[in-house]
Image: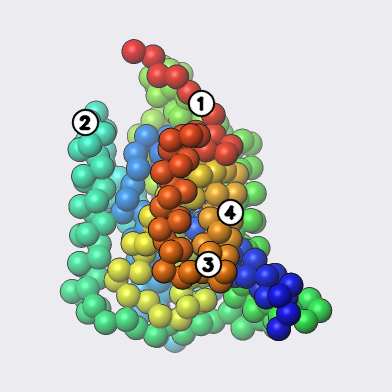
Amino acid sequence: MSGVVMFFMQIINGLNIGSIYALIALGYTMVYGIAKLINFAHGDIIMVGAYLSLVLLNTGMHWSIATLLSILGCALLGFTMEKVAYKPLRKASRISLLITAIGMSYLLQNSFQLIFSANPKPYPAFINLPSLKLGSITISSNYYTTFIVSVLLMILLTLFVKKTKMGKAMRSVAEDEGAARLMGINVDHTISLTFIIGTGLAAVAGILYSNCYTIISPTMGSLPGIKAFIAAVLGGIGSIPGAVLGGFILGMIETLVKAYISSQLADTIVFLILILMLVFKPAGILGKNVREKV
């Protein structure tokens, strides 16, 4: 394999894992943009989506119905988390919300360890489309499917936020919650809808991730969740296109570092990117600097 072909294969690998990061980062960026909450339990939703779909697929259910039910299950979980864990603390300090989010993360992980055990389980991949050949490069169906789904969902989500009544309500709450209440917008319903959409997207990411790597475990969402948060910061947390752009950039950087520098340094460089972004450009690539009034 020539160096050029090898390089393009790494770019494709980077876009694949970057698509997963992008889908998770979309949930992060929506929740933060509207509720001003960094939901560190969000990464574990991809694990929940993977296990729900695994259970349904093992019953012989068609993959399309299993996928839809898994997304609905995760959306319901996101709605419940917001109502039970986060809504009572909405007026509390940021550190209280952060600790609660971390607690929810451990609760989900340990609950699924009790139910399914800590041992990894094989996942029956159901995406069986033909591979795509570009000259001497063969692209697996899992790779281009993941990329297409992430870009399509970004476009649909952007249109939803900009064109629909509920999307405009989300933007209003994100801009000024108090003013949105005075205009008659139901802020509680808007925040709940944000959690529903975000956790549904995380479920899609979990299913696509499981199709690519075919092994799932109760802790599978921890590291991708943290990296998706870094992707959201990189692209500009609060920006939907920024979350996707950050996911793709981070995925390619991680893959190229593993291929050409060291696989052991890949995570270190990813976290170094987070530090550098927070120091030199905290708003991210597509984010906006906003001054808080005191």
Going from the N terminus, do you reach mark 1 or mark 2 first?
2
Mark 3: give few (<14), some (14-19) or many (20+) Cα within 10 Å.
Answer: few
Whole-angstrom CA distance, mark 1 to mark 2, is 24 Å
Q: Residues within 10 Å of mark 1 (few under 14, many from 20)?
A: few
3 vs 2, front mark = 3
Location of mark 1 (residue): 289
Element at label 1: loop
The answer to whether the residue labelled 4 contacts the one labelled 1, judged by CB atoms less than 8 Å apart, is: no
Q: Position of residue 208 (x, y in %)?
A: 51, 70
Q: Which residue is mark 3?
A: 261
Q: Quadrant of residue 133?
A: bottom right
Point out the tag, 3 or 1, that comes first from the N-terminus.
3
Q: Check the image and name the residue furthest to the front.
A: 261
Camera sees residue 62: no
What amino acid type is highlighted by mark number 1?
Asn
* Residue 273 visible to an observer of this rendering: yes
Tell me the residue at 48%/34% (across/down).
280
Q: Secondary structure at mark 2?
A: loop
Residue 87 % position (x, y): 26, 38
Task: Verify CB contact (< 8 Å) between mark 1 and mark 2.
Answer: no
On-image quarter of the C terminus: top left
Residue ID for mark 4: 249
Q: Secondary structure at mark 3?
A: loop
- C-alpha separation, residue under disc 3 versus residue under disc 1: 34 Å
Q: Earlier in the sequence, mark 3 or mark 4?
A: 4
Residue under the image location 71 percent in, 83 percent down? 1
Against 130, residue 40 (above or below) is: above
Q: CA distance from mark 3 to mark 4?
A: 17 Å
Q: With respect to residue 9, does 15 lie above or below?
A: above
Q: Nearer the viewer, mark 3 or mark 1?
A: 3
Q: Is residue 142 above or below residue 74?
A: below
* Disc 2: which residue: 92
